[in-house]
Image (cartoon, helix red, strand yellow):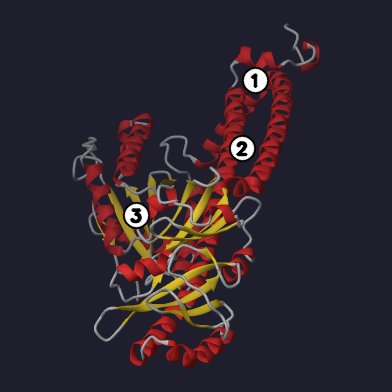
Amino acid sequence: MHAVKTAADAGPPQPDDLHSHKRPALIWSSIAFFSMCALLLGMTVWIVWSSHTVRLREAGATTENMARALASQAYMELEVADVMLEDIAEHVRNEGNNDHTGERLESHLVQLSRNIVEIAGIFIFDSQGDWLATSAGTGQEGNNADRDYFIYHKTHKQLGSRISAPVLSKSTGKWVLPVSRRVESADGSFAGVVLVTLGLASFERIYDSLNLGNTGTAFFALDDGTLIYRRPFQPEIIGMDISSGALLRAYREKGPVGTAMMTAKVDEIERLYSYRHLERFPVIVAAGLSKEDIFAEWQRLSIQIVLASLVAGAALLYLFRKLMLQFALRDRIEASLRLATAELQHANADLAAHASQDGLTGLANRRCFDEKLADELHRAQRGGHDVSLIMMDVDFFKKFNDQYGHVAGDACLQAVAGAVARSVGREEDLAARYGGEEFAVIMPQTDAAGALQVAEAIRMAVEALQIAHAASANGVVTISLGAATLRPSQDRQATSSELIRQADALLYQSKNSGRNRVSSHMPPA
């Protein structure tokens, strides 16, 4: 007799034991482990990438809002200057451009400059560039014939307002943005210039209020590329030509509004810029956050996420190793129990089969029949649907046994059972041996017409077997059938014995009517 080797006799378990046995547990555990690692890696990449995208989108929204605010502020100041110039030019055109007109308008200019803080100065120049009137009051003299805007209006007949490059004001010594307009005499000849200067300090207050990070920027330029103002403020770059820069190229190629990652011409720093071109003026404003500032916090969080993922991966590896050791130990224990388990399962299967099957015919036995019929009637009671029962009996079976013997009788019952089973097509129907030569079929959710159709099919299938039966008038084995149908409801309960009694009565009706036939009836409404 061989000794049984236990798990304790084999020594400590090793993961290599699993590899040698090619256990399915090893395969599935490995798949689960690597799937979790892949999932962890995928989630890490997705979180890092999606947070990068979200951060970039948020930064884009921030720069767009800043550019919109800067455009609104610039448009408002230029619109005020434009309306003011048009009004003053109209007065000068109607009253003439002379010292008398200048004296009369000067108090008006002083009042206008006091009411609008963005205005640095208002000037009226004659055709020679001499000051006729200023918002600074009486006693102010000067000549601006050398200024770019004066030369332009003297040589161009354009009557609209013109925005020039910033200059240092001769009257205040501060940086101002000239907005000027040509004045003509009645005959259309050049009669002088009216000028409104906007202090760059007013733009600086707005630009300094923006949260641009450590290396962000915002600027205000003419659309020919002349830089008017840039934050951080650097006097030496005012008037710089940035027309060849990336942002001006983007404006020319893509239109008046846009957002893109670009490298600045001034300091070579890569930033996310949003720009807007003013509708009525040749001016473009832009705000930009540096790529370094945008992603500084994202980089810190990404490093933390990656480190956390590495720690989680190491923990998974440790758990996987422990799991393999447990599998090795379990494999040894299962090896000693596998045979006993298989035998027990085989015995249980045999018991289950014997408990529900008829030993001779292979159909369901009487016990299974009783349980199934009771269950279906209860289910029909809740659902309110029909339950049909077909009871059948082999005609003159006692005479068949007396003439051909019990062995032939058993073979006959087996053949009839096979015909019954083949005629019952639905999975939910149950064909059973009720007792002796009597069989039954339970048909849930089947009305009387359906039961009659199946019963007739069974009758024909048995007759088609052509089993010789000398004691029968038909010369072959036949069956008689009774098909009964009940429809339980909340008000009308039905029992198994009631349905069996009805089907049995119909069966005997078939026998009394000449056998080899089906008797049925419609259930009460």
341 relative position to 219: left or right = right
Secondary structure under tag 3 reads helix
Secondary structure under tag 1 reads helix
202 relative position to 223: left or right = right
At x 33%, y 70%, the residue is: 154
Q: Which residue is mark 1?
A: 339
Please identify the quadrant where the C terminus is shown.
bottom left
Residue lying farthest left?
474
At x 65%, y 22%, the residue is: 338
Tell us which disc is closer to us: 3 or 1: 3
Dot 3 and dot 1 residues touching (CB under 8 Å): no
Cα separation between marks 3 and 2: 46 Å
Taking 121 as reference, is 515 above or below it?
A: above
Q: Which residue is mark 3?
A: 252
Mark 2 neighbour density, 10 Å: few (under 14) some (14–19) many (20 or more): some
Residue in the foreground of this view, choosing between 270 and 513 = 270
Residue in the foreground of this view, choosing between 335 and 398 = 335
Task: Write down the quadrant of residue 98 in the picture.
Answer: bottom left
Mark 3 neighbour density, 10 Å: few (under 14) some (14–19) many (20 or more): few
Q: In the rendering, which numbered label is found on residue 42? A: none
Residue 228 appears anywhere in the view: yes
Secondary structure under tag 2 reads helix
Q: Amino acid at mark 3?
A: Arg
Q: Which residue is mark 2?
A: 40
